Amino acid sequence: MTTHAVAPRRSRPATIEPLDTHRAVETPEGVDLALRVAGPVSRALAWTLDCLIRSAGYTVVGMVCAFLGAVGQGLFFLTLFVGEWFYPVVFEVLRKGATPGKMALGLVVLHQDGSPVGWTASILRNFLRFADFLPVAYGFGIASMLATRDFQRLGDLAAGTVVVHRDAARYGSRVPAAEPEAPPVPLDVDEQRAVIEFAERVGGWTEARARELANVAQPLTGERDAWAIARLVGIANWLVGRRPEGARR
């Protein structure tokens, strides 16, 4: 009986997972989004910048209130209350999901489905910050971020939010920016993806090829040639979640 030597199995080299990971979500419209979730380090730096900004504001207000006696003292404590509790909420909702610190680090807060954060979610995630701070120095918050796939602190878990890099806030799409236009008729998932792929790839085609393909969609656009191309790109912008400036809150 002959025996055959068995070559030793080579083990795969260890891979190092990046701290910032990609999260795939699908919108109700059937559009796939790739969100690059921000890790604890970048979030901590953004938080530190926001603390410095608030501290500078408190210093200026304190200097003014010092001349107002008891009234100034009350105004100062009111400023502290509003600044600590509502500073992040106002910026996240009115400034497209980012406080000044997050803007500087290129971060933005979104719902888990990739949609912009609203008042309810922002208030909930920020008012629960006190729980993340416990027992000291954001102990629970850091533990929660390290234990969850999307680096969510307790406030994020309760509000259903994630913090991602701003390049992901463009909905993971290469659709060139244009005035968004709602589709004139409902589109199924395959039709939506076809329109988005056209907009993403149109820049790499010759003008003749782009017009030829755009004219195929004349039943949707009601246009031909350059007008059809422009309208398809506008519809693609709408499908990936962009909205006209006047429609934003």
Image: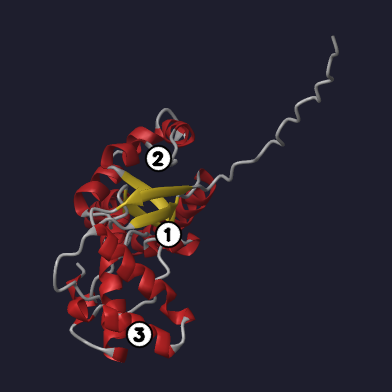
Marks 2 and 3, the one that precedes in the sequence: 2
- Please report the residue visible at 14 percent of the width from the left and 74 percent of the height from the top: 184
Residue type (three-letter) at the residue carrying disc 2: Gln
- Please report the residue visible at 30 percent of the width from the left and 72 percent of the height from the top: 237
The residue that disc 1 covers is 168
Using the rendered image of the protein, determine whether residue 83 is visible from the camera's viewpoint. no
Tag 1's secondary structure? Answer: helix
In the displayed structure, would residue 11 be above or below residue 122? above
In the displayed structure, would residue 245 be above or below residue 124? below
Of 80 and 231, the residue lying toward us: 231
Using the rendered image of the protein, determine whether residue 46 is visible from the camera's viewpoint. yes
Where does the C terminus fall, quadrant-wise? bottom left
**Looking at the image, is mark 2 or mark 3 nearer the viewer?**
3
The circle on residue 212 is 3
Query: Picture quarter containing residue 92?
Result: bottom left
The residue that disc 2 covers is 152
Of 236 and 122, the residue lying toward us: 236
Gap between marks 2 and 3 measured at Cα:
47 Å
**Looking at the image, is mark 1 or mark 3 nearer the viewer?**
3
